[in-house]
Image (cartoon, helix red, strand yellow):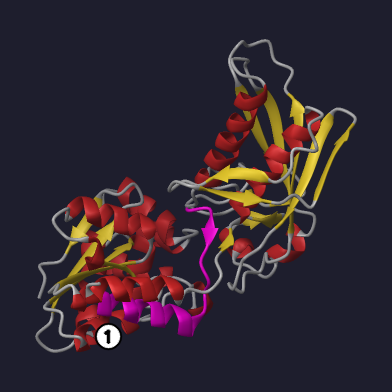
Amino acid sequence: MPVHQDLKLKLRHQSLRTGFSTGTAAAAAAAGALLALMNRGDSGPIEVPLPGGGSLTIPLAQQRRQDDRGEAIVIKQAGDDPDVTQGAAIGARVRWLNVSTLESEIRLRGGEGVGRVTKPGLAVAVGEPAINPVPRQMIRRTLENYWGKYCPGQPMRLEVEIFVPQGEELARKTLNPRLGIIGGISILGTTGLVKPFSHQAYRATIAVALRVARAAALSRVVLTTGGKSEDYCRLLSPELPEEAFIQMGDYVRFSVQLAGRMAFAEITVAVFFGKALKIAQGMGQTHASQGAVDLHLLADLTAATTGNASLAQEVSQANTGRGALEVLKRAGALQMVNVIGRRMHQALRAYAAVGTEITALIFDFDGSLLWRSNSK
């Protein structure tokens, strides 16, 4: 067996237990509630298709039909990740939707314990329940799968309400209040899975992945913050093999320093704008527990660069880095991305070994490339 294949096997075996996201829990609960509404409450655990392919089998903690609705609850399992929602009940209520249309329709609502978005800059619009786009897709797809199994060819018209009995209490332990999400937690997930957030284990995983790349005789690695940024980088560099792409998560300084010590000739670091802001302000570890984005710094830089005090004020009042980027885009002030990019690039170069070529990329949230450094 080639050395790099052996290391890839070690990488998999060293992983901690993976859990499932609140989005996966909500999708399973919704399907369980639908089955209860259809008087098929004895159908067993729920099969939830994952966005990246494959599926998870999720057990139901409760399932019943009550009057005009079906209801089910799933107990969130975060694996070895110290998630605030570990062990939380994630529930769904499903009712028939009384509409005259012949088309299928699913109306999604947030019940008790699910936050509501009150500020712009998040993945869902103001006024909507804080159920992110991927969990919404998972809920719909899971319901469609079960509906197609029992009612093929018939239109599906449902009202789906996601609820979290202890959600409001749990939300106090998160950043939701600061982000303007009130009344409960967010239903999250981009892969359906929760990977363990253990500092030691994650750093070890990054180190093994870098050794895999060295064993494959690669001179360049691409460090990304997660699956989405990796996907976008793969489109930009289709010539690179799988081993070149390494998800560093929030461990920016650690990953760049280690890659530099391992004598990779070129290190590409790809982030979204919010992470770029954190790196530009000197944060080598970008997890939310280490601090929030300093939008006042961005506002000061905006004032100094554009001379537009009102724009700087609007930036300082943005809810998130994403929201601040939208403010800059509307104002036609994308030169600020260049300012942040150069500061980020300078920080990354300080982490790397002397002589290592550093390329920095900043992506917009739709995958378009906002900024690329001139390397070196």
| Residue in the image at 30% along x and 59% along y | 230
Q: Is residue 306 left or right of residue 69?
A: left
> Residue 21, position in %: x, y?
59, 57
Residue farthest front in this picture:
1
Is-magenta flag for residue 203?
yes
Check the image and report above or below for 55 versus 197: above
Task: Identify the element where label 1 is drawn.
Answer: helix
> Residue 22, position in %: x, y?
62, 55
Residue 136 visible in this rendered orientation of the protein? yes
Is-magenta flag for residue 43?
no
Magenta stretch, residue numbers: 191-212
The residue beneath circle 1 is: 258
Quick one: quadrant of the N terminus?
A: bottom left
Q: Is residue 285 left or right of residue 306?
A: right
Q: Is residue 198 left or right of residue 83?
A: left
At label 1, counting other C-alpha atoms closer than 10 Å, the crowd grade (few under 14, some 14-19, many 20 or more) is some
| Residue in the image at 49% along x and 48% along y | 123
Quick one: quadrant of the C terminus?
A: bottom left
Residue 298 visible in this rendered orientation of the protein? no
Main secondary structure along the magenta-highlighted residues? helix
The amino acid marked with disc number 1 is Leu
Identify the image quadrant of residue 363.
bottom left
Q: Nearer the viewer, residue 300 or 249?
A: 249
| Residue in the image at 59% along x and 44% along y | 48
> Residue 201, position in %: x, y?
47, 81
> Residue 129, position in %: x, y?
63, 44
Check the image and report above or below for 18 versus 120: below
Check the image and report above or below for 69 versus 262: above
